Amino acid sequence: MRNSTYSQLQKSASEKLTNHAKKSLLEADRLAKKFRHSDIGALHLLYAIYLEGGSLGSNILKDIGIKEKSLSSALAKMNFNPKNAPSENTIKNIVTRAYSIAKKFSYSYVGTEHLIYAIIQSQSKEIARIISDVSLENLAKSVNSFFDPSQFSNIPQIFEVPEIIVGKKSQKKISPTPFIDKFCRNINKEAKEKGEIIIGREKEISRIINILGRKNKNNPLLMGEPGVGKTALISGLAQLVNSSSVPHCLYRKKIMGLDVAQLIAGTGFRGEFENRLKEIIKEAARSKNIILFIDEIHTIVGAGNIPGGLDLANIIKPALARGEVQIIGATTFSEYKKYIEKDMALERRFQSIQIEEPNEQETKKILFGIRKNYENFHDVVISDKAIGSAIELSVRYIQNRFLPDKVIDVIDETASHARSKHRASDFLREIATLENEKLSLLEKKEKMVTEEDYAQAIFLREKEKEIETQIKTIQEKHFAKKKENPIHINSQDIMETVSQMAKIPLEKITQEKNKKIKNIQKILEKQIIGQKEIIEKINYVLLRSQSGISDPDRPLGSFLFLGPTGVGKTLSASLLAKEFFGNKQSLIRIDMSELMERHNVSSLIGSPAGYVGYGEGGRLTEKVRRNPHSVILFDEIEKAHPDVFNILLQILEDGVLTDAEGTRVDFKNTIVILTSNIGTADFTNASQIGFGSENKALDMHKKFNEIKSNTLVELEKKIRPELLNRLDHIIVFNALGEKEIQKITQNETIKLVRRIEKQKIKVTVAKEVMLFIAGKSLVFNQGARLVRKNIQELLENPIAEMIVYDKVIGNRINVSIKDGKVKLA
């Protein structure tokens, strides 16, 4: 009986069985003879698989903790009689079931793992007894985890798997492209489900269709900056295919998006990745109606490459050369140059199509086309003005990103924000209460059914239905109310979103910006003393930039500040950052004394390739990229190496700077300020004459005008004229006289008094004290720098001592002059 059964199996099954499976069957036969059993059963086969070292089935059994001793002793105790054994446990039925399992999971062979799966389904009591420590359920889970058809596709497909029909219900239509179905997504199907309409881009789509219709080299490669709509074009093409609005060569074509990450995932064994990809290429070649789309196609270069293996690019090149498969790729210019252009054999298989950023008018058409999708998703109404504002503001304030992507992001986030502001909290609370009540009734109903109290269970079911009706009614009322009073998205909402995304004050982009500009001049005049004419020049530059009549391809303003130390050059830059851009953190200060050597200049834009620091970004470019709305202060420009001027020329002329990695950084929303001490000696000499001379009628104004002229002449000798000509204004700050120092002293004293008032202490400073401090600070070569130092020594230190040591009486401090000294009481 045993010999006839096994000989039948050898004839019918050996063609598809792996070597390990064949050896296991032979070993099962030997075990039956050894234990003098009349036929081979499930336990014989399980023990045989366990002994087949190196097989997947043996590894599974050993991994879950089955011991050889358990199997051996179970066989010794077993008195196997095939007549009494259930039909499921016979070796013939187990092998037949293994074939069915292999067929179900699209395997081209039958291995030991399939035999184990079939043994589990036989539900043998003997096997259940041996696996006392490991349940059959855990064994089944362990086997199931191995059932990925892509992992074992390297077994040669020699013969067809025999059809095993158990019944009509078990018949399942097998896909002719199982690998493509597993590792690709159907873009035609996605386009149909989303129903999004592609607006514009007719020229680009027409070019893609023309390339796909070619006899040779019919593989389009879309190149463009991130966010210009490369992937959307493929969805648009899929829509045209769905509607049969394409030439005959694309009729009923399926565009399948290849997921490279999923293709590589789990390919731990050598050759696995290559076999998956080969199967995909074979299926695409056989079907004749599949076009593969690889987004970020540069990732195929080096993808899946392990020692001794091939990467994805090298595997697909022969198929592309033979025209067996059509591929559409998409990548950016930088990634194309970095990866694909270097591989000439790969590059020549594709036809490049440059996808340009749409202009504002084209972007508006695109947004009008997709507006309904966002309105339906967010339950809002987006006005035409809101779309116009989103385009205008994103172009002006959101840099280093491209249309239409950045505008879509603005509208999407604005709609999300508007919806979150109008939270239907009462509605949600009411629904949640009813849902909890319904859940409670459901639990009680199940309990009643278990206790066979069907009358109570029916009553609870009716209550449950009532709650469902209430929930439905509340939802209908809520949605009806939303339709009557929808949330409207307007320009103000767009401005708030752009303000948050671009990290700039809301006032700067709202209608209040004109008021703010008017106030900036007053604020600067109040804090920068003695420079009224200079502040007017700065204000006019700001007015031109905010009115929109200045050159949009250059920085908002560019200045060169000259003059003696301590007159307010750096303070002006700091105040501009605070008042115009909203905070002091918007000031980027570059000390040019650190860039005196040529090799230091590269730190502004980053180290070149091959040098230490490459890839870390530049000091200047990284700061501007993170905060594109800022004041950039290049302090003491005359100390810098001449190569710095080349960088400044690019910023001032084009409004952009390219860093060491080839990334363009936008400077169009910055204010560039250079400072210099050229001509300082003349100011110092003039100031010395003015302060020390007994002749007060000396016309200092005339003298300073002469010095300014001389300073500009000296400036032209030291700074390249092409740089000076690109600046909006070259401003020479006036030296500070006695009145200016007195005013600055007064301002600084008032600031100190206000700080002390926060401690609930009132401080009164006599006018004579401020004049005394101003007189002491009036040193010809120090400007206003000594004012703070003297206030600190004469006022702050003694007041701090009085506060800390509790010497303040009645929360009042009076400061006066007595015997030529500052006294506090």
Image (cartoon, helix red, strand yellow):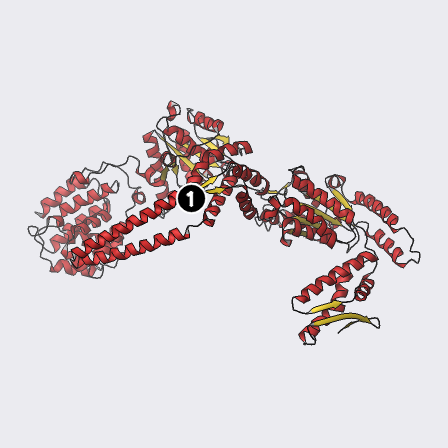
Residue 793 lies, in percent from the top left, at 75, 68
Count of marks overlaid on the render: 1
Residue 347 lies, in percent from the top left, at 48, 33
Seen as rendered, the residue at the extreme right is 695
Q: Quadrant of residue 482?
A: top left
Q: Quadrant of residue 287?
A: top left
The C terminus: image quadrant = bottom right
Front one among 783 and 814: 814
Front one among 581 and 141: 581
Front one among 349 and 208: 208
Badge 1: how crowded within 10 Å, few (<14), some, or many (20+)?
Answer: some
Q: Which residue is mark 1?
A: 305
Task: Please tell me which residue is depicted at 29% across the width and 48% down the height of the picture.
Answer: 469
Residue 762 lies, in percent from the top left, at 70, 68
Left or right of 35 on screen, residue 608: right
Left or right of 299 on screen, residue 663: right
**Above or below — where is 476 with respect to 79?**
above
Task: Please tell me which residue is depicted at 70% across the width and 76% down the height of the picture.
Answer: 807
Left or right of 603 on screen, residue 562: right
Left or right of 557 on screen, residue 466: left
Q: Tell me the SS state at disc 1.
A: loop
From where the camera sits, is residue 164 visible?
no
Amino acid residing under circle 1: Asn
**Above or below — where is 773 with respect to 462?**
below
Residue 605 lies, in percent from the top left, at 63, 46
